[in-house]
Amino acid sequence: MIDVKHLDKVFGDNHVLKDLNEHIEQGEKVVIVGPSGSGKSTFLRCLNLMEKPTSGHIVFEGKDITEAKSKEVNQIRQKMGMVFQHFNLFPHLTIKDNITLAPIKLKIMTKEEADKKAMELLKRVGLEDKADAYPAQLSGGQKQRIAIVRSLAMNPEVMLFDEPTSALDPEMVGEVLDLMKQLADEGMTMVVVTHEMGFAREVASRVMFMADGYILEQNTPEEFFGNPQNDRLKDFLSKVL
């Protein structure tokens, strides 16, 4: 589904991603872990061209998207939902309007269709009573579930999660991870940058370790956590488990 070939990203003097080659299959749940500054979030943001690669190629569903024009980039992003660390909801819009804005504006759905879809999704996450509320009236965990629902309203084929629980109070983390587990169970292709090792162990089809701009090791959760090979990974796991 996604092919990454010789991906490099440089910010000034900082070489953040170094010759990454990766293949993500449809239906896979790839969880990326690693120390801060290792390039995890930059890698994720390159996948949907929120960051333009310095060199290399990203092929999505058979099309090299690194060559895409700006209009095509928007179409690509419709297929790749992105959930950030901070919820990025529009504070002046109701929850329902936050969810329906993009599908209506991009003419993917009529207002009636978008409203119906929004209510179905809100019901699914147990927040249908918040449709007419504003983001400031919600808890952090509720806002993040709405941010996920907003991405789902676009009917994406891949969901990208950039540390979706790191800005939340500990007691709110579970409700967001539970929703992500549901999506995984339903077969959604997911690429997740996270510090939640329990989630990686339980949900990932593959766990990837990044450090210093390289992918140093990847494996099934059982092998990754139970039998790490790379010394840097062993050191990392000894600190986080």
Image: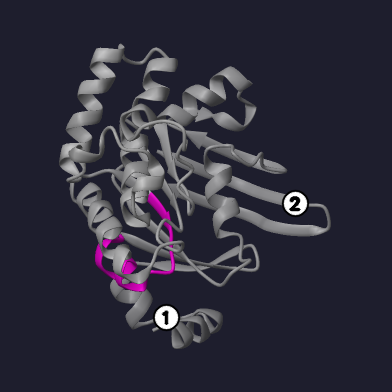
- Which color mode does the image show? one colour
Kindly identify which residue carries mark 2.
10
Residue beneath the point at 48% across and 54% down: 85
**Relative to the observer, which residue lies in front, 5 or 88?**
88
The amino acid marked with disc number 2 is Val
**Relative to the observer, which residue lies in front, 226 or 80?**
80
Q: Secondary structure at mark 2?
A: strand
Quarter of the view holding residue 176: bottom left
Confirm whether residue 191 shows in the render: yes
Quarter containing the C terminus: bottom left
Tag of residue 228:
1
Confirm whether residue 25 shows in the render: no
The amino acid marked with disc number 1 is Pro
Q: Earlier in the sequence, mark 2 or mark 1?
A: 2
Q: Secondary structure at mark 1?
A: loop
Segment colored magenta: 191-204
Query: Which mark is nearer the camera, 2 or 1?
Result: 2
Residue 123 image offset from top left, x and y in percent: 16, 38
**Horizontally, is 84 left or right of 189 in the view?**
right
Residue 212 image offset from top left, x and y in percent: 65, 68
Residue 147 image offset from top left, x and y in percent: 38, 43
Position of 26 relative to 102 (above/below): below
Position of 224 relative to 157 (above/below): below
Marks 2 and 1, how far apart in space? 29 Å
Quarter containing the N terminus: top left
Position of 96 relative to 189 (above/below): above
Residue beneath the point at 50% across and 79% down: 233
For label 2, count other residues whose C-alpha is less than 10 Å away and answer few (under 14), some (14-19) or many (20+).
some
**Horizontally, is 10 left or right of 86 in the view?**
right
Residue 112 within the magenta-colored segment of the rendering: no
